[in-house]
Image: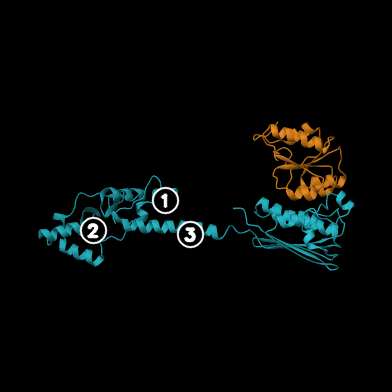
Amino acid sequence: MTTIPISTHDSPPFLLDLIYRMKIKDVMTRNLITARKENSLRDIKLLMKEKAITGVPITEPETRRILGVVSMDDIIRALDGGYIDAPAERHMSRNLIVLDEDMPLQFAISYLDKFRYGRFPVLNKERELVGIITSRDIIVALLVEVNKEVEKLEQKIVNPVPVAGEDIHLEFAVRKLDFENAGKASTEIKKVLKTRNLNPQIVRRIAVASYELEMNQVVHAEGGTISFALQGDRVVITARDLGPGIEDVNKALQEGFSTANEWVRSLGFGAGMGLPNVRRVSDEFSIQSKLGEGTTVKSVIFAAAEL
Amino acid sequence: MTTKDGRMTFDDIIRALSCTVVVRGTAFETAGIKSLVSSDLMSDVLTTTEEDFIISTSLNSEQVVRTADIVGALGIVLVNGKYPQDAMRRLAEEHGITLLSTPMDAYRVCFTLGCAMESRGRASP
């Protein structure tokens, strides 16, 4: 394969950007195997075999100028024509197409496509031979770069940007019918979450869950605690109270079911939306309750950081 | 006096509802209000998924401010000419939530703002 069929019209922008961004000097082989014009074609044939290469630039070592190239084709013709012991200068290819080391890689790709040569000598500004570029060099360089990019993308998929900062654990005491302070725990939790780079909608879900649980304790329980834990990208809100416990948990989870009295309702609560609402905003939800003992509600919300 | 994308400013709301300004919140000048949630049940307000909205309610308690903060409401309009207690006003100041009072009742508030938002093509269901 001597050409690299990269379409410059409909390839992904990344690839196009890459072949314009990379310079020939970033890709070429600098470890040059050259011969002199007086070397015989037979010597060059041996050199090719020994080094496993298919073309040898003929140079003038003093000036580092390139004079020509002896390719596998030239060797075959020499064997056919019986002049394998002739010096290189007499039969080498002199119509050379060379590339400049500062050209974008895209030039090398289109030259390989256009001229059907297996390799191009690369010159610096002083017209000295500094490298040689083959389709193999290009394939290897592109694979390495594309691989780096794919790794970056995979990294993004597997590990979404982690929630910055350390784990947090907060605990708040909630008192029975203390409407004045009701909601303080949730306000604090929201404040803490705001300092992290979290999706605002997720912050809202967490705040709603903790607020509903807090209000539940104020309205129904003999006091309790709200604990908040941010562990990695997982938020766990646990509401524990000291009773009286819920008679029928399934009923309590129905929208509109409430045992709240008129006074509580006059304060805007007790509409029977609390627990269903917590469940709605949670990714994981569990409730345990025992009459005369108390209730524990656990709400888990995955707080993936905002990308 | 609407924002560029047709949302209502607090100035628009104050004029439309003849409001008294109790607290000028942090977003008072800049807020672009897209919709209204009207309820006396804060539990109901907590279930809303609206964005860039204000709450109208006849409930005159700190829990309205807490709820507004939790759901990220831009402001609160107290209807029926209710005027907040000091504790509610202080909490609104603390949380930077705009607090208004209007002599209109809940129906009139919804009707007026509904029409205004509809005419801007921004009414929400």
Q: Quadrant of the N terminus of chain B?
A: top right
Q: Which mark is residue A92?
A: none
The amino acid at mark 2 is Gly
Q: Nearer the viewer, mark 2 or mark 3?
A: 3
Mark 3, Cα crowd under 10 Å, few <14 / some 14-19 / many 20+, is: few
Q: Mark 2 vs mark 1: which is more N-terminal?
A: 1
Q: In front here: A147 or A286? A: A286
Q: In front here: A275 or A241? A: A275
Q: Which chain is cyan?
A: A
- Judging from the image, what secondary structure is the residue with disc 2 in? strand
Q: Are marks 3 and 1 on the same chain?
A: yes
**Where in the figure is residue A261, as x and y percent of width and height?**
88, 54
Q: Which mark is residue A151?
A: 3
- Judging from the image, what secondary structure is the residue with disc 1 in? helix
The colour chain B appears in is orange
The residue sitting at 35% across, 56% down in the picture is A138
Left or right of B103? Residue A78 is left
Label 2, label 1: how far apart the Cα atoms are: 29 Å
Which residue is label 2 attached to? A55
The amino acid at mark 3 is Glu
Q: Are marks 2 and 1 on the same chain?
A: yes
Which residue is label 1 attached to? A15
Q: Mark 3 vs mark 1: which is more N-terminal?
A: 1
**Where in the figure is residue A61, as x and y percent of width and height?**
23, 57
**Where in the figure is residue A174, as x and y percent of width and height?**
83, 60
